[in-house]
Image: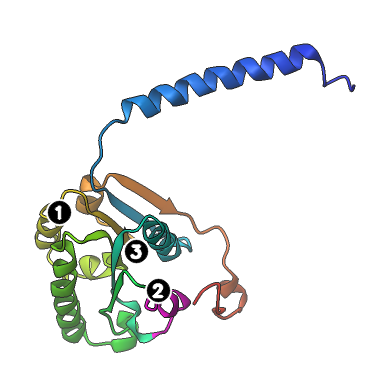
Amino acid sequence: MTSSDTPDRDQGHRDRMRRKKDVIDAAIARADREQGLLLVLTGNGKGKSSSAFGMVARALGHGLQVGVAQFIKGCQDTGEEAFFRRQPGVTWKVLGEGFTWETQDRARDAATAQAGWAQARAMLRDPALGLVVLDEVTYPLKYGWLEMAEVLADLAARPSGQHVVITGRAAPEALCAVADTITEMADLKHAFRAGIKAQKGVDL
């Protein structure tokens, strides 16, 4: 037995863990409501869409039907799309034509976003969908291609048990105000800035 492995140290650890368990158990007991959640994954860091697609896998594991409306990234194939399109229970819509610096056509980008939102709205009105992912929808909101009031109204009118995950940088304050959970990804270091191109299975 080392000097740190003493009975008093073990008892102190048990006491701390017991107090921690009491706090956590009390918090769990207070959380007694069930409802559809609105989650926003934002920030400049990598992993926002990947986190959302992890929730797609989780939802499917629980037998939920899932809808994915993918804005902006429509010009490139991703591993998530290739995988989830083959899964029963997933409706996947690619609604974009690529980043705005690729198309360089503001009117066309706006029209594409508005047509895409009509399809996203259909998902938000479908009670069979337990989870809807609106991937990169913050960009059409930021650039004014979609009306914030319209988007908020459609989110508010969705079935009461439907969960929605929104991803993208610079989530607008109005969207964050109605969200139940917000996660901000931080960018501390990225391989791309060291000259390493996007890698299949990690970035694509």
Q: Which residues are magenta?
A: 76-86
At label 2, which amino acid type do we have? Phe
According to the picture, the residue beneath numbered tag 3 turns out to be: 168
Q: Secondary structure at mark 2?
A: helix
Q: Please give left or right for residue 78 compared with residue 95 in the image.
A: right
The percent position of residue 39, horizontal first and vertical second, equals: 31, 51
Judging depth in this view, the residue of 127 and 138 nearest the camera is: 127
Q: Disc 1 and disc 3: Cα gap in Å? A: 23 Å
Judging depth in this view, the residue of 33 and 71 nearest the camera is: 33
Quick one: label 1 or label 2, which is nearer the N terminus?
A: 2
Residue 159: mark:
1
For label 3, count other residues whose C-alpha is less than 10 Å away and answer few (under 14), some (14-19) or many (20+).
Answer: many
Q: Residue at x 75, y 16 (%)?
A: 9
Judging depth in this view, the residue of 6 and 44 nearest the camera is: 6
Which quadrant of the figure has residue 126?
bottom left
Q: Residue at x 44, y 76 (%)?
A: 83
The percent position of residue 187, horizontal first and vertical second, equals: 50, 59
Q: Disc 1 and disc 2: Cα gap in Å? A: 23 Å
Q: Secondary structure at mark 3?
A: loop
Can the viewer see residue 193 in this picture? yes
Q: Quadrant of the N terminus?
A: top right
Quick one: label 1 or label 3, which is nearer the N terminus?
A: 1
At label 3, which amino acid type do we have? Gly
In the displayed structure, would residue 50 be above or below residue 193? above
According to the picture, the residue beneath numbered tag 2 turns out to be: 84
Q: Is residue 122 magenta?
A: no
Judging depth in this view, the residue of 146 and 57 nearest the camera is: 57
At label 1, which amino acid type do we have? Pro
For label 2, count other residues whose C-alpha is less than 10 Å away and answer few (under 14), some (14-19) or many (20+).
Answer: some
